[in-house]
Image (cartoon, rainbow, N blue to C red):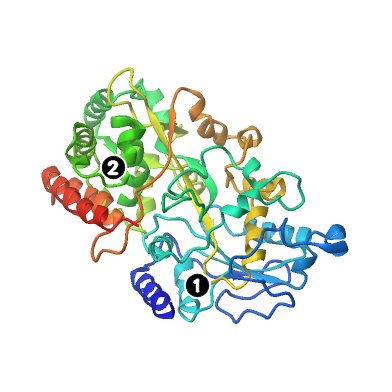
Amino acid sequence: MKKKILCTLMSVSMAASLLAGCGSSDSGAGDNSGAADEQKEDTTDETPDDEGTSADEGNSGSDAAEDPYADYAGTKISVAAIETAYGSDMWKEVAEAFTAETGVEVELTTDKNLEDVIGPSMQGGEYPDVIHLATGREAGLTEQFIKDNMILEITDVLSMTVPGETAKVSEKIAEGFTDTSLTNPYGDGKTFLAPMFYSPCGLFYNAGLLEEKGWEVPSTWDEMWELGDKAKEEDIYLFTYPTAGYFDTFLYALMYSAGGPEFFDKATRYEEGIWETPEAKTCFDIIAKLASYTNPITPAQANDQDFTQNQQLVLDNKAIFMPNGTWIVGEMAEAPREEGFKWGMTALPAVKSGEDSYSYTWFEQAWIPEGAENQDAAKLFVSYLYSDKACEIFAKSSAVQPVVNIADKLEGDNVMFYSIYENGVKPAMGNFAAFDAIPGVEVRTVFLDPVNSLVSGDMTEDEWIESVISSSDQMRANLK
């Protein structure tokens, strides 16, 4: 097991690269400071077994009746969270609120390059008790832990009572968020990752530009190409994208549009022959044609250091649409923009008039490493992330938890963004199934990164299709 863990973390460490922005480690919740790679303190009440028990099951006797968290007395957990456009202050506040509610102290580490910060200590066998780090990042740490079965199952957390409340976690989380491959990666009905901040994803644009030009938001791809031709006459490109990685949510929504949930499920499970179907050809054709309408400077800036320059193309009216999520507003809040700029968002156009249009619901994940020392307390912390108090703190930074009726508490641009599903647009959720490690074969390198080459002309659509079919055969043969 040690050898397996070491190999996994060495591969993650080698794959990790600098991500968007430059950050510094920010540790501590209240007076409880320290980095995740420091030696954990011994607790006075050790976890009884590797599997752990829920907060409801772990307390007994008169002490538990008076204090439901008596069994956690003296416990300190380490929490590592990626710092994104939402900032790190919200994590400090949530950690402090959790300690005030349960008495469990939190040693907090946040960083924009979290993989680089927690990687070395994990190679030495010291794991944070809770990690908030989504799939889809360039370093692929979360995916590596999934592939190597090193994430603790947290199905029992769904039946836990949210600290400070009477509701169960399962009653707080919105429908559908724990029935997806993003939380249940092995397709066995068991939950391993907790759904976190969610964002309707789609095409973001300058609504002021379209109003000024008298252009309508396309409802079909044919209308999209017509708009692209009009814009080209005025030296405006139809499309750009931050990095090729942003095509994950785009591709997922497109697969739903082309063939519905049935095609999506088969494609994301790499069913034999699926990439040679008419539905698949529709997806390939649309992306390849969109590449010809993309601002040609995009690939050169489509990396984790320069991606905001591609986003700036939309603010400067040098491109109309880009795939993104609701975090874009905060991420570009201080960026200059054309006069009259205002954010707009639309779902992907329907393949044909009258057919369904989809917006992918992207969400982050929190998880507990299988090697975590304080698994019971870690589960308690995860359950607290869905409390009204935690959701209120997160929402102040525009980080929206996937809980029931959360949209009623939003304001500003978020009202428009999160109401997208109220206007006939259907939600798309899920991702490609996990498979055992294959040298040189990753979802991103096979399905997403080639978009850069399509735009630059270094790869043809047929070459891309051939690569997808070949790689998909390997993925299917190595499904977990």
Task: Give the numbered dot on residue 303.
Answer: none
Q: Which residue is located at x 36 percent, y 36 percent?
A: 253
The residue indicated by pointer 2 is 267
Q: Amino acid at mark 2?
A: Ala
Q: Earlier in the sequence, mark 2 or mark 1?
A: 1
Who is closer to the viewer here, 399 or 85?
399
Pointer 1 residue: 118
Q: Residues within 10 Å of mark 2 (few under 14, many from 20)?
A: many
Q: Tell me residue 315's x, y (percent).
A: 40, 40
- Which quarter of the rendering shows the N terminus? bottom left
The local secondary structure at tag 1 comes to: helix
Asked if labels 1 and 2 touch by Cβ distance under 8 angstroms, the answer is: no
Regarding residue 316, the answer to whether it shows in the image is no
Q: Gap between marks 2 and 1, in whole Å?
A: 34 Å
Q: Quadrant of residue 317?
A: top left
Number of other residues with Cα within 10 Å of mark 1, as a class: few under 14, some 14 to 19, many 20 or more:
many
Secondary structure state at the residue bearing disc 2 = helix
Q: Position of residue 240 (x, y in %)?
A: 30, 42
Asked whether residue 162 is in view, the answer is yes
Residue closer to the observer: 369 or 346: 369
Indicate left or right for 469 with 206 as reference: left
Disc 1 residue type (three-letter):
Ile
